[in-house]
Image (cartoon, helix red, strand yellow):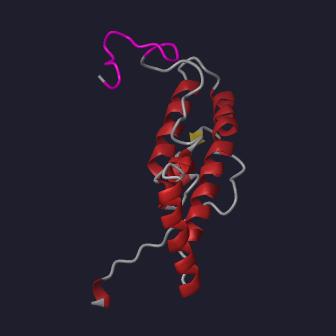
Amino acid sequence: DPATVLRNDVRTAAAPPPAFHRGRVALLGDAVHPMTPNLGQGGCQAIEDAVVLAQLAAPDADLAAALAEFTRQRLPRTMDVVRRAERIGRLTTWRSRPACALRAVLMAATARLTPDLALRALDGIADWRPEGPTYAAGTRGTRTAAQPKEHE
């Protein structure tokens, strides 16, 4: 029944904001860089924002400088992810029969010839690491006794 269909519009950042903060207030995630769900990165980018902001806005840090650095570090990366998600989204919204047939052939051929090609869309995204020391370890890449080893 068409009346039972739930419709939610998808919003995306049409243009980069001038900054991710104003005064003492910072915006994170979709509040500042909304993106289409095509890469599954909305929540991931919000977590990255939080990690970077936590590193920069240490209790002894100059807050104004920390927020300016937060924008400097995050703006280029998040807008790149926004644009990449939009490009993939455009591909998935083709409607004409010839375009849909072409897309189906391209996807099938890609899956057979280079199965890892779809994962390449996440190159430079899924392999992100925070700059500088991590909060839990004190230094980047150092594991404390309380932290479990990955993949054991």
Predominant SS of the magenta segment: loop
Residue 139 on the magenta span: yes
**Which region shows up in magenta?**
137-151
Q: Residue at x 52, y 72 (%)?
A: 105
Q: Residue at x 49, y 17 (%)?
A: 141
Task: Name the image quarter holding the N terminus.
Answer: bottom left
Image x and y of residue 61, in percent: 61, 20
Q: Quadrant of residue 84?
A: bottom right
Regarding residue 90, the answer to whether it shows in the image is yes
Asked whether, in this view, residue 39 is left or right of residue 63, the answer is: left
Image x and y of residue 8, in percent: 42, 73
Q: Quadrant of residue 13?
A: bottom right
Tell which residue pokes out farthest to the front in this image.
113
Q: Is residue 83 above or below residue 2?
A: above
Image x and y of residue 129, in percent: 54, 30
Q: Residue at x 34, y 77 (%)?
A: 6
